[in-house]
Amino acid sequence: MSTGIDRINMQIMWNRLIAVVEEQAQTLIRTAFSSMVRECGDLSAGVFDLDGKMLAQAVTGTPGHVNSMAESVKHFIDRFPVAEMQEGDIYITNDPWMGTGHLNDFVLTTPAFHKGKLVALFSCTSHLIDIGGIGFGPDATDVHMEGIYIPFLKLADRGVMNETLLAMVRANTRQPVESEGDVYSLAACNDIGCERLSEMMGEFGLDDLDELGTYIIDRSREAVLAEVAKLPKGVYKNTMPVDGYDAPLDLVATMTISDDGIHVDYDGTSPMSKLGINVPHAYTTAYTCFGIACAVAPGVPNNAGSLGPFTVSAPHGSILNAPKPAAVSSRHITGQMLPDVVFGCLRQAIPDRVPAEGTSCLWNLNMRGRNLGANEAGAGYVVTVVTNGGAGARPNKDGLSATAFPSGVRANPIEIMESISPLVFWKKELRPDSGGEGRYSGGHGQSIVVENRHGEPFDILASFDRIDHAPRGRDGGADGANGYVGLASGRKLNGKGFQEIPPGDQLIVETPGGAGIGDPAARDDDAVQADRRDGLIGTLAAE
């Protein structure tokens, strides 16, 4: 029978394990070549037991990476049995259906040893800016057009790197130096995790993680089920329309809350697209579970135990369960909408704990051109500039402006992006009157103007949504503003797809605003006047 001291010791070791994986993640940030990682934190890092169950994840990271990576380690074990793993081995894949949803995310898994004994597995993910193919956009019609596809392979065999594999990576990207550097960055990330875990186990006198792992998973599951038990049981449904590529889509969810947990079924959702906005099931599960966790059990750390009570199903062949070889490069555009869909269900059960709809999907500016001169791959520059719209109003607070919920990815500093490309950002500011009015207003989007300072054309690989279907207000709150993409010369651009910005013209981007909650007439007068002083609303809106 465990004593209070035993539980205290377990909690201390659990917190220490979280610190280990956080240092793992920080190593990735500090060594990454990808601006999406070093500037924006588009990554994940975690430690797993020998059955592939996640024990701890870094606080730094994105839900789409972490929650889908949680399943990918089991696939590594199926391919490389733990009994055959050696010190110095490293395994790699970017399989969208067994990794984190698209080819731009490389997943590395490394066995961790203590005193010569295999005790755990470390895994990490990061987003590479370019992996060949047509580029990071939704125009492909199958996954093979989207870039280099790495099956489950050994990156290192007992410390010796697979030079043939690295040569293949370099040859299939417009950024060979950066892409190879990111592979080494991922490897270093896991190496640090292995080192710090061994130090921790030595400090606490552990020979394995069996008892600690069982404690973590059991306590986490119990904590989540205790929160689920407080919810009104029943079946709740919600439908949310989104822009899609060439036709609107319906994301349809049926949520069942029971004593055993929460299940979300997406039957009725639109069928898969012929273009790259499809979502593999692992990514659908990742963002669905994240949305539930935010509302139901936000204080419980992410691991196999806390994720276990949440289950997800989607019809095979739907846009939320698109089978290989579907095009999936821009799966985030659809997948990041799912917390809003989930909140629409939960609103019927716990209305005081969920926000109104927000922009939700990232408004990344994926741009490239050639006028800097060819690099060793014969290409010019390729940049991904992370931009965001407004988040939905919360039940008792305004929504956050220019905030990446649910992805958690930070915006790139513009100075960094201008230093690695010939692009100049003439404008990047909050977009007035874009947040939906309400007792609590939605967050504001952004107004952005971009030009090639050398007067040359450049390409945008547009992957935007909420242009035709704005975030919807709630309880009398107004909708958020629709997004817009166009040229300074007046032409409106498509929200999705490859398009060229002509020489001398400027790209105009207006990101959506979040929706409001409650009657605008009930808004606090001090808040109205503060918005007016800050230039976020005009006189008419204030009145």
Image (spheres, rainbow, N blue to C red):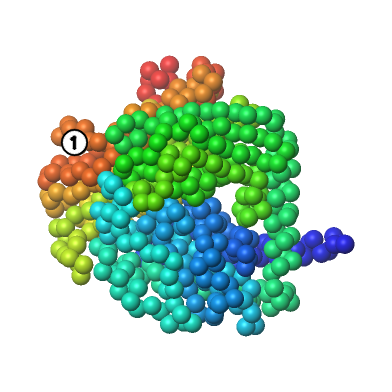
Q: How many marks?
A: 1
**Residue positioned 13% across, 44% down in the render:** 502
Name which residue lies at 28% across and 54% down. Answer: 145
User: x, y (%) of residue 212?
Assistant: 72, 65
For the N terminus, give its image quadrant. Answer: bottom right
Residue drawn at point x = 61 percent, y = 53 percent: 302
Answer left or right for 505 relative to 365: left
Of the pair 196 and 56, the residue shown nearer to us: 56
Taking depth in this image into account, of 335 and 398 the one nearest to the observer is 335
- Snapshot quadrant of residue 464: top left
* Residue at image coords 67%, 41%: 261
Q: In the image, 61: left or right of 353?
A: left
Residue bearing the label numbered 1: 488
Residue type at the position of mark 1: Ala
Is residue 205 shown to the viewer in this render? yes
In the image, residue 60 lies at what x, y percent?
52, 57
Which is more toward the observer, 312 or 298? Answer: 312
In the rendered image of this protein, does residue 268 appear above or below residue 7? Answer: above
- Give the side of residue 351 with respect to residue 154, left or right: right
Is residue 524 placed above or below 273 in the rendered structure?
above
- Give above or below for 226 relative to 416: above
Give the structural element (helix, strand or loop) at label 1.
loop
Mark 1 is surrounded, within 10 Å at the Cα level, by few (under 14), some (14 to 19) or many (20 or more) other residues, namely some
Q: Is residue 73 above or below residue 307?
A: below
Q: Residue furthest front?
A: 316
